[in-house]
Image: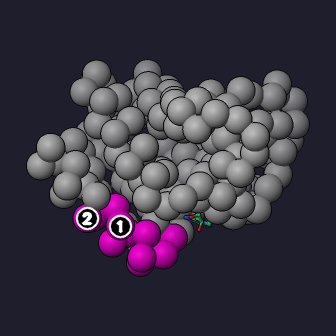
Amino acid sequence: MRQYARILTGRIEALRVDVVVNAANRALAPGSGVDGALRAAAGPELTRLTDTMAPIAEGEAVMTPGFAAMARYIVHTAAPIWPAPGDRAHKIAALERCYANAIRLADTHDAATIAFPCIGTGVYGWPKELACDTALAACAEASAQTRALREIVFCCFAEADAALYRARLERFLET
Ligand code: ADP
């Protein structure tokens, strides 16, 4: 994972990577945060396409072209809503699947680089530490089985989030 991981602060729609991951909702309907930023970058063709697509399950990942966005592809995945009723372990497993399925899908499409936002930590209300630990664990496991993937970027909106990822990545590598 050390050779794979890069932690950045900034806006995900500005990254020139093969795949950006969208913190989408299950309906693939236009939203705020990452979803709004990626739709603005991709242009109206993205929403014209997602309007024709079936809803996804929590943890599922589906791919579209990036259209006018910097990235070649956008992978859309839906996290569970943290404060919604439901079992904590199930929610964590679903967030792990968001990351693992996105990595598998990207790798299948020969992507060398993939960028993730801090999925679930905006309007979906996840505690930042738990979301970060879940992201790092899932990516470490999934990246052990990739063929094309060379780099995973964790794109943090706030410097405080990037600091959390840096600290946790170090700790994660020591264990
Ligand atoms: P979710 O619905 O999964 O919580 P959000 O898009 O609301 O997704 O937020 C996820 C995380 O992405 C939050 O930490 C938020 O601050 C961050 N974020 C919001 N806009 C951007 C952006 N343009 N680029 C990268 N990260 C962003």
**Is 5 colored magenta in this rendering?**
no
Q: Quick check: 77 left or right of 123?
A: left
The residue at 67%/40% (across/down) is 80
Identify the disc placed on residue 164. Answer: 1
Asked which secondary structure carries label 1, the reply is helix
Q: Residues within 10 Å of mark 1 (few under 14, many from 20)?
A: some
Asked which secondary structure carries label 2, the reply is helix
What residue type is disc 1 on? Leu
Q: CA distance from mark 1 to mark 2?
A: 5 Å
Q: As rendered, which of 163 and 6 lies closer to the eye? A: 163
- Labelled pair 1, 2 in contact (Cβ < 8 Å): yes
The residue at 54%/59% (across/down) is 127
Instruction: Find residue 155 and report its image quarter.
Output: bottom left
What residue would you read off at disc 2? Answer: 167
Q: As rendered, which of 137 and 6 lies closer to the eye? A: 137
Q: Quick check: 83 left or right of 88?
A: right
Q: Which residues are magenta?
A: 157-167
Q: Quick check: 27 left or right of 62?
A: right
Task: Check the picture and name the quadrant holding the N terminus.
Answer: top left
**Is residue 151 among what the camera can see?**
yes
In the rendered image, the vertical position of residue 26 relative to residue 82, given as above or below: above
Q: Give the number of callouts.
A: 2
Relative image position of residue 56 (x, y in whole percent): 74, 28
Relative image position of residue 94 (x, y in whole percent): 57, 32
Q: Is mark 1 within 8 Å of ligand 1?
A: no
In the rendered image, the vertical position of residue 63 relative to residue 22, given as above or below: above
Instruction: Find residue 18 and report its image quarter.
Output: top left
